[in-house]
Amino acid sequence: MRRVSLLAKVDLDTCIGCKTCERVCPTLSIKVKDRKAVVDEQRCTGCGGCEQRCPVFAIKLVERDDPYTIEFKIVPEMKDKVDELCRKAKFHPEQIICYCTETRAEEVAAAVLAGNDTPEKISAATGIRTGCKIECIQPILRILNAAGITPEKPEGYQWYGLTPTLWDINEDVKKRYSDGGFRFDDDIEVFEKVINAKK
């Protein structure tokens, strides 16, 4: 969940319409129209990505008059499907996959099952990837992938490539490094126990 108390505000006299803000926004809540950045105030999570990267300092974060919380509630009838999707993506459902917002795998899985089929929609629905905006693209992509969804990369600077996990290491690599003290299969066994652990 994420408590949203800030909002991006654009100084239209300073904005040069370069689209940097549009390209870095994790929820696609800022767009350039008529060479000026326009913020969708209902969608903005106040993450600061646009403010930090604006080359002319035209964007500032201000206190919201109406702070709100982003949280995706899991209804009981979804729980089994949510758990199944998390485990298919190699996450325990209660595992925190975004440390900035403390978003759990089950929240993202529930959002995906509810029809959120891109990282940007998932970020807007759960708050994930609206803190540092760096690490948590991987868990989102893994859960989407486990659901059979391959999102198209939006125009911008968002990285959509998946990095390998323990389960992706091939037998040749395992064999080559086993003498160096790497025990990939043992690690996989431990992780599988954690992933499949019950409450």
Image (cartoon, rainbow, N blue to C red):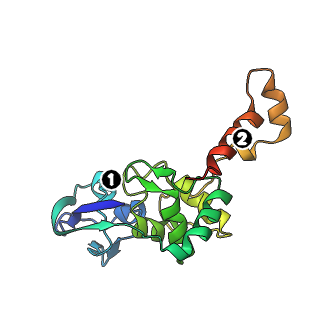
The reply to whether residue 117 is in sight is no
Q: Which residue is mark 1?
A: 53
Callout 1: SS: helix
Instruction: Give the class, few, some or many, for how many residues have Cα within 10 Å of label 2's Cα (few <14, many ≥20).
Output: some
**Type of residue at label 1?**
Arg
In depth, the one of 117 and 75 nearer the eye is: 75
Residue shown at 32%/53% (left/top)?
A: 53
Determine whether, in the image, residue 154 is placed left or right of residue 164.
Answer: left
Q: Is residue 92 above or below residue 188?
A: below
Quarter of the image with the N terminus is bottom left
- Marker disc for residue 197: none
- Seen in the picture, residue 53 relative to 42 is either above or below; the reply is above
Q: Which residue is mark 2?
A: 188
Where is residue 56, by image quadrant?
Answer: bottom left
Q: CA distance from mark 1 to mark 2?
A: 39 Å
Residue 161 image offset from top left, x and y in percent: 61, 54
